[in-house]
Amino acid sequence: DVGVIGVDSGWEIYVGGNGGIKTEVAHFLCKVKTAEEVIEYSGAFIQIYREEARYLDRTVHWIERVGLDYVKKRILEDAEGRTAAYERLLYALQGSVDPWAERVNKRDEHKEFDTITV
């Protein structure tokens, strides 16, 4: 889970957290200045989680196991590693198909959502 909050001086990124029966508060990862940084840092987090977490492991449990300091070290202190992880995520997503793209691109099927002018 990744949460992003816009603040006056940029963006705050939170990771982990859990809703449901056993709720957990998300952990503050970092504050960044640009939307591009939000995408790179979040993407790198997701990719490192994909590579290192156990199958069906929630982010909150993975962070609990490896430690927030480890996650911060991988994302914040290793700029080259962060960029490489983000690039691996982009590569992995190249072959994926957006299940909504076809519907979104067909305007004639959106009539029920068109604006009604009174």
Image: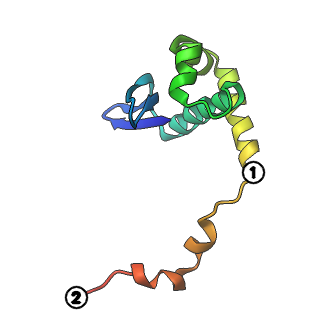
Residue at the far bottom: name it: 118
Of the numbered discs in the image, which one, if any, rests on residue 29? none
The answer to whether residue 85 of the structure is visible from this angle is yes
In x, y percent, where is residue 2? 49, 35
The crowd level at tag 2 (other Cα within 10 Å; few <14, some 14-19, many 20+) is few
- Secondary-structure class at tag 1: loop
37 in relation to 114, above or below: above
62 in relation to 38, above or below: above
Q: Is residue 15 left or right of residue 25?
A: right
Residue at the far front: name it: 21
- The answer to which of marks 2 and 1 sits earlier in the sequence is 1
Residue with the mark numbered 2: 118
Q: Is residue 69 left or right of residue 90?
A: left
17 in relation to 91, above or below: above
Is disc 2 in contact with disc 1, using a CB cutoff of under 8 Å? Answer: no
In x, y percent, where is residue 12? 40, 30
Residue with the mark numbered 1: 94
In x, y percent, where is residue 53? 66, 26
Q: Amino acid at mark 1?
A: Gln
Give 84 or 65, whichever is nearer the viewer: 65
The crowd level at tag 1 (other Cα within 10 Å; few <14, some 14-19, many 20+) is few
Separation (CA) of disc 2 from disc 1 = 44 Å
The residue shown at (48%, 40%) is 35
The residue shown at (59%, 14%) is 66
In x, y percent, where is residue 90? 70, 43
Quadrant of residue 31 in the image? top left
The answer to whether residue 32 of the structure is visible from this angle is no
The residue shown at (61%, 67%) is 101
Q: Amino acid at mark 2?
A: Val
39 in relation to 110, above or below: above
The residue shown at (22%, 88%) is 118
- Secondary-structure class at tag 2: loop
